[in-house]
Amino acid sequence: MLVLASGFLMVPDGYYFFGVLWIPTPFHQGELTASLFEVHRIACMALAMLVILHIGAVLKHQLLERTPILRRML
């Protein structure tokens, strides 16, 4: 949720959604949008690390412990 919210708020002056629908954003270019960009970057890195950890845990259970976790997940 933090990635989505900070991504929306960091864009200054709005944007076209898929080139069709204009989405206004509440802030203009400045210190606040720069700070929100940093929050967005950190949140994206944290999300990527959680995905990597999740994949690693699945592989550990599937390959080392021989638990059919992947079959249950799918």
Image (cartoon, grey):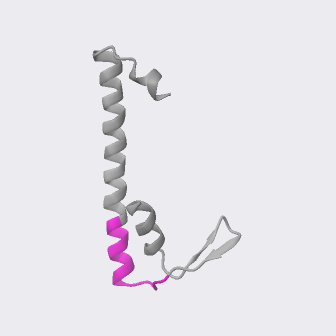
Judged from this view, the residue extending furthest toward the right is 20
The range drawn in magenta is 26-39
Compared with 10, 60 (above or below) is above
Task: State left or right for residue 4 relative to residue 59.
Answer: right
Looking at the magenta stretch, what is its main secondary structure?
Answer: helix
Task: State left or right for residue 10 relative to residue 65.
Answer: right
Residue 55 screen position, x and y as percent: 36, 33
Q: Residue at x 39, y 23 (%)?
A: 69
Compared with 25, 57 (above or below) is above
Task: State left or right for residue 28 relative to residue 21.
Answer: left
Judged from this view, the residue extending furthest toward the front is 72
Quarter of the image for the N terminus: give it: bottom left
Judged from this view, the residue extending furthest toward the top is 66
Task: State left or right for residue 60 relative to residue 29.
Answer: left
Q: Residue at x 68, y 72 (%)?
A: 21
Q: Residue at x 41, y 68 (%)?
A: 6
User: Residue 50 colored magenta?
Assistant: no
In this rendered view, identify the residue nearer to me: 64 or 68.
Answer: 68
Residue 52 screen position, x and y as percent: 34, 39
User: Residue 30 colored magenta?
Assistant: yes
Residue 63 screen position, x and y as percent: 33, 17
Tell me how many marks there are.
Answer: 0
Q: Quadrant for residue 23, please give it.
A: bottom right
Residue 9 screen position, x and y as percent: 44, 74
Q: Residue at x 46, y 21 (%)?
A: 71
